[in-house]
Image (spheres, rainbow, N blue to C red):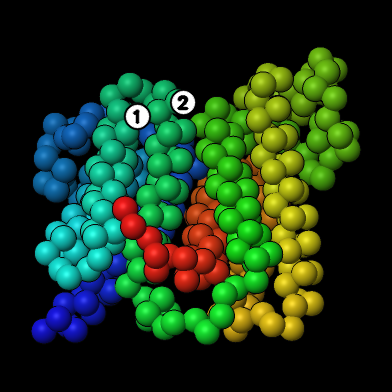
Amino acid sequence: MQLSFDTLIRLLSKLVVLATLLLIFVGALIKSHEVGLSVPDWPTSYGKQMFSFPLSQMVGGIFFEHGHRLFATIVGFLTLVLAIIVGFSNQPKWVKQISLLALVLVISQGLLGGMTVLYFLPPPISILHGILAQTFFAVTIFIAYSQSKIRSRKQKSLSAPYVRRGAIILASLVYIQLILGALMRHTGSGLAIPDFPTMGGLWFPSFSESMVNNINVDLFDMNLDMVNKWQIFIHFAHRLGAMVIFFFYCIFLFKFVKDDNRKPLESKMIVIISAFILLQIALGIATVMTERLPYIASFHVVVGAALLGSCVLLVFISQSNKLEELRF
């Protein structure tokens, strides 16, 4: 009976990870389409209880906004069920505590989502809402990894020190980059530099008044909103962050490929991370070149989350022996 109980936890934890990733994509569509207040009340939807809102009225922006609420509720329910099952299981205490943390995070995320509506999309709350979504996603991966067959297999040897350090640094850099991405999206800085690979016609921005004016002339010709120097700086910081991640990863990858003692599982993760990094760069460029086409911009967000998840998983795999000693 215990074996089937553990199997249920394992499957449910993976389902929560996949559902959270899809929820991030659904949430990104709202911002990409700029329909965050299509349903102006919360927790009701046009005065109706959420699940009683007619499907026939889910049109236009309401489809994205109300659909996001419905899907978020499902993710919250799955997280609650997971926390309850883990709580009554024979799982280690630290797994129970992490599951409880996930529940606290998803509840907080729901409240922040409601606040963004009640306070008319204030940037600080919207940014925190986006950051918390990525944090919750990382925590769900931790839970799923704790139940995986990979973790249950004892490694014969420790991962190389450079792999352990590199995985942590890479995951940290990607997390910071996602924070910059959330800051950029919710301050209207997504097209603050509308050209690529140049920036305001320059290879390195000067942030001078002349540069700001040149960018605003281009934005005016494109029928887009004007921007200020602060927005241009935020956008530049996001591009710079992408370059830092890419060059750090190239160095890490070069060292990893030359290592004759690299582990097969780590090699698989490196292939996945490499694919996500290349795809993410391509989507970032496409986001600018297509003037933030909604689905491209949204895929850019969700691939960023997938990249973070892959990096976090590499951290867990490379630190697996130490994770066995976790005590909370």
**Observer-nearest residue: 133 or 260?**
260
Q: Is residue 207 above or below residue 129?
A: above
Q: Which residue is mark 1?
A: 116
Residue at image point 46% right, 26% down: 123
**Observer-nearest residue: 54 or 77?**
77
Q: Secondary structure at mark 1?
A: helix
Q: Is residue 63 visible?
A: no
Q: Is residue 249 above or below residue 153?
A: above
What's the mark number on residue 123?
Answer: 2
Residue at image point 23% right, 29% down: 41
On the image, the x and y values in percent for residue 217 come to: 77, 23
**Most extreme residue toward the top, as rendered?**
209
Label pair 1/2, CB-CB below 8 angstroms: no
On the image, the x and y values in percent for residue 2 come to: 14, 81
On the image, the x and y values in percent for residue 218 come to: 77, 28
On the image, the x and y values in percent for residue 30 come to: 42, 42
Q: Quadrant of residue 36?
A: top left
